[in-house]
Amino acid sequence: MGEVIRRSEVPSSRRAWVHGRGPVILCVAGVALAACGGPATPEIEPAEPSSQGVVAPECREVDPLEAELPEGTEPTGTTGEPVEDASMPDGQNDGATTTAPEALSLGPEIQTWAEQEAPDSFAGVWVDQELGGYAVAFAEDVDRYAAEVREHFHPGLAVAEAEHSYAELRAIQERIGQEQMGADDEPGAIRSSGAQVMINRATVGIFDPDDERLAELSNAYGATAICFEIQEAPSPPNEGIETLAKAPDWRDGLAEELGQFGVFEVAYDRETAEAAWRDNIPDDLEARDDELPADPGVYGDLDQIDFDRQAVVVWSSGESGSCPEWLADIDHADGTITVERERAGGMCTDDYNPYRMVLAVDHDRLPPADVLPSAQLDGVPDGEVRIYPAAEG
């Protein structure tokens, strides 16, 4: 998948693999995921009246749950490193060291036990890198379940108190999926729903919402139970960058010649620019006047270019089949050209569909012609900068 849903900005030292059928249980508009089905979850009541009028935060603003270790105990550890026997369950001690349970087996075992023994209280289990071991959260009878889970698995399990159980978050997630999700690009459209146990929230991926829409969803599902992953509306190219045309595929020979993710070519004079146009723009390309140059078409022509202050850029790269893209910004500094791409669509398929664009770009966004061949390209995984045409550069 692409990279449209943003992960909550939990401090890097606390980010960890989360048990709960994967890092995040996620349902995506237009995409079928196993986590969206499964056994029926208990129905929940509408949001508490006390939360009415309160707007849920963005997920990146939510603090993670704070888990605590019992005084005088060592954490479970996160690998198979040897630990002292005193830190193992049941007081096993044969005078030697033994090995902590493997990180990827202890977590699922804790979750299975908790979902059976504390289904209305269990709120998730994760690796807390800062503490150096596993943490588990409960929403009710925390002291009781903390004692039981430590006795059953490990005395060094960290425990956090949560406001919502995992079952409650999953129920909210499924309600959002059933009642709200759609695959359109209208402002306020819900594109995904998930459950993040480390912040104890059901996540709502929403496209370009206004304040009224955020308040509506907060009132419907609970301002303390959900958080928003807001996807801003894509922007047109910045001032000083004009899209003249976009066409599918790279021109003949270019992909085989360079084999890069993206190629940035510049024509500084009109004669070279005319050659670039002939080489890259098919005669049957449809005329378009869209504000966002996402689709193939002709958006302008060479006659609108002032070559005293502008040059022509031919940009060849690739895009997701479900999220067409364009160059939104170009700048240069210290021998590096930086490109920024914008895309339409929500959750993007992880495929590479080649395309090319012809743009008019102000000189102050580009290095001089004599410096260009040595410039580096930033903003794509692997790119090349050339004087047009690259195959002869």
Image (cartoon, grey):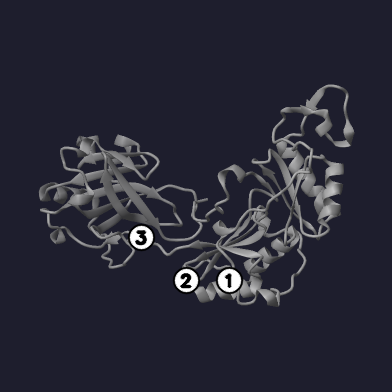
Looking at the image, tell me whether mark 2 or mark 3 is earlier in sequence order.
Answer: 2
Residue 46 is tagged as: none
Quadrant of the image for the C terminus? Answer: top left
- What separation in Å lies between label 1 and label 3 (alpha carbons)? 33 Å
Q: Give how far across and how far down residue 269 sits, in percent.
A: 12, 48
Kind of residue sitting beneath label 2: Pro
Q: Residue at x 36, y 45 (%)?
A: 379
- Of helix, strand and loop, which one carries label 2? loop
Q: Which structural element holds mark 3?
A: loop
Marked residue nearer the N-terminal end (1 or 2): 1
Q: Residue at label 1?
A: 55
Q: Position of residue 231 (x, y in %)?
A: 48, 62
Please identify, in this view, whether the residue under mark 2 or under mark 3 is nearer the observer: 2
Task: Please tell me whether mark 1 sits on a helix, a strand or a loop.
Answer: loop
Give the amino acid at mark 3.
Ala
In terms of image quadrants, where is residue 142? bottom right
Q: Residue at x 47, y 71 (%)?
A: 187
Q: Determine whether 294 is above or below 102 in the image.
A: below
The residue under the point 32% across, 59% down is: 296
Q: Label 3: which residue? A: 294
Residue 238 visible, this angle = yes
Residue type (three-letter) at the residue carrying disc 1: Val
Q: Which of 221 and 50 is in front in this view?
A: 50
- Is residue 78 toward the left or the right of residue 382 in the image? right
Residue 253 visible in the current orientation: no
Q: Would residue 173 be found to the left or right of residue 8 on screen?
A: right
The label nearer to you, 1 versus 2, is: 1
The residue that disc 2 covers is: 187
Give whichever of 29, 136 is nearer the camera: 136
Question: Could you tell me how far apart the alpha carbons at marks 1 and 2 are, in whole angstroms?
Answer: 18 Å
Task: Report the front residue among 64 and 305.
Answer: 64
Whether label 2 touches label 3, CB < 8 Å: no
